[in-house]
C-alpha cells in the first residue's frame, strides 16, 4: 500500500550553487514515526529539510512520500501533506495568533477552520489565551508553540521541524518539545525533527540519526557514549 511507505530518500544530493552539502544521503521515516536528526553547525540539517520540502536544488535516486515522487515545488509538497516549520518560527508578527493559524489552515486546504482550531487548542491548551494577541508580542516559547500549532492545523501526513528547541529556556525546551511531539503522535503525523539538542531528541524520538559529511548515520539511542560524542 502506497500509504505504508512514508518518506523514502536514497542517494540525495543537495546544496547551493556549486557547493554540495548532502552527498548521497539515505533516510526513511515510516508512517507515524518520530525521527530526530542531530549534527554539528553547518552539517546540512536545514538543507535536508529544504530539499524535502522543495526549496533547494537537489537530485536523488529516490525522493518520495507515500510512494509519490517529491517535486521541486514547495506548494505541491504542502498538498502532499508535508509541512515545514522553519527555524525562527516565521510568524506574521502584526497578525494575531488566530490569524496566523487561519493562514496555516488556508494553506493546508482546511475546510472547517473552527473545528480544526478547537482540536489543536485541545492538544496545545496554552494557545487559547493567546488567540487574540499579536504574534510579534509573544515570548519566543509562545511563538514556537504557535508555529507548531500553525503547522499541525491541517493534520499534515509528515511535519518537518527545524530546531524546535532553539532559543528556549531549559524548562521550556522540555515542555514545548514534549507537547509538540505528543500532539504529532495523537494526530498520527510523522515527524522529521532536526535539532542541536541531542538530549531532547533522544528522549522524544523513536529513532535518531547523525548528519555528518553529508550523509545520515543511525545512532543507537541506548548507547550513551555515542550520544555524548555527537558533537566531538
Ligand atoms: P545549523 O545547525 O548551524 O543551523 P545546519 O546543519 O542546519 O546548521 P545548513 O543550514 O543546512 O546546516 O547549512 C549547510 C551548509 O550550507 C553550510 O556550510 C552553510 O554555510 C551552507 N548554506 C546554508 N544556506 C545557504 C545558502 N542559502 N546559500 C549558500 N550556502 C548556504
Image: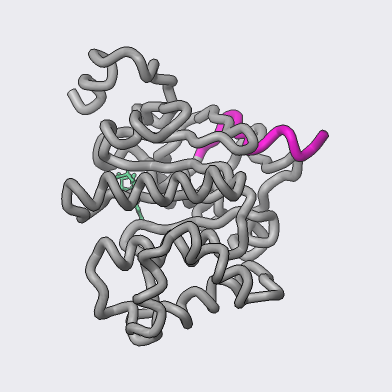
Identify the image quadrant of residue 200.
top left
Taking the view exactly as shown, the residue that stands out farthest to the right is: 1
Q: Nearer the viewer, residue 225 or 11?
A: 225
- Residue 185 lies, in percent from the top left, at 54, 43
Q: Nearer the viewer, residue 132 or 101?
A: 132
Judging from the image, the colouring scheme is one colour
Q: Nearer the viewer, residue 182 or 100?
A: 182
Could you tell me which residue is drawn at 25 percent across and 48 percent down? Answer: 173
Image: 1 above or below 82: above
Q: Is residue 35 left or right of residue 139?
A: right
- Residue 183 lies, in percent from the top left, at 49, 50
Residue 15 seen by the camera: no
For the record, the magenta segment spans: 1-13
Residue 209 seen by the camera: yes
The quadrant the N terminus occupies is top right
Could you tell me which residue is drawn at 37 percent across and 61 percent down? Answer: 145
Asked whether 199 falls inside the magenta stretch, the response is no
Q: Nearer the viewer, residue 137 or 115?
A: 115
Q: Is residue 102 left or right of residue 193?
A: right
Could you tell me which residue is drawn at 27 percent across and 44 percent down? Answer: 174
Image: 3 above or below 163: above
Could you tell me which residue is drawn at 36 percent across and 65 percent down? Answer: 126
Identify the image quadrant of residue 41.
top left
The quadrant the C terminus occupies is top left
Image: 96 above or below 154: below
Q: How many marks?
A: 0
- Residue 127 lies, in percent from the top left, at 39, 69
- Residue 113 lies, in percent from the top left, at 62, 76
Amino acid at each position: 500500500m502506497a500509504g505504508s511507505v512514508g518518506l523514502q530518500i536514497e542517494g540525495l544530493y543537495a546544496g547551493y550553487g556549486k557547493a554540495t552539502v548532502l552527498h548521497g544521503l539515505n533516510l526513511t521515516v515510516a508512517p507515524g514515526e518520530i525521527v530526530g536528526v542531530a549534527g554539528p553547525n553547518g552539517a546540512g540539517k536545514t538543507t535536508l529539510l529544504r530539499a524535502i520540502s522543495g526549496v533547494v536544488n537537489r537530485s536523488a535516486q529516490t525522493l518520495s512520500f507515500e510512494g509519490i515522487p517529491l517535486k521541486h515545488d514547495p506548494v505541491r509538497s504542502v498538498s502532499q501533506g508535508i509541512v515545514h516549520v522553519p527555524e525562527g518560527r516565521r510568524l506574521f508578527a502584526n497578525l494575531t495568533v488566530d490569524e496566523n493559524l487561519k493562514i496555516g489552515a488556508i494553506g493546508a486546504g482546511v475546510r472547517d477552520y473552527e473545528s480544526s482550531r478547537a482540536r489543536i487548542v485541545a492538544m496545545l491548551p496554552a494557545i487559547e489565551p493567546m488567540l487574540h494577541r499579536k504574534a510579534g508580542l509573544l515570548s519566543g516559547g509562545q511563538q514556537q508553540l504557535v508555529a507548531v500549532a500553525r503547522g499541525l492545523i491541517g493534520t499534515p501526513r509528515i511535519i518537518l521541524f527545524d530546531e524546535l528547541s532553539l532559543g528556549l529556556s531549559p524548562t521550556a525546551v522540555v515542555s514545548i518539545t514534549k507537547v509538540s511531539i505528543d500532539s504529532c503522535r495523537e494526530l498520527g503525523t510523522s515527524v522529521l525533527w532536526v535539532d542541536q539538542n541531542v538530549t531532547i531528541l533522544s528522549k522524544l524520538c523513536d529513532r535518531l540519526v547523525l548528519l555528518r559529511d553529508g550523509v545520515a548515520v543511525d545512532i543507537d539511542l541506548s548507547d550513551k557514549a555515542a550520544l555524548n560524542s555527537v558533537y566531538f
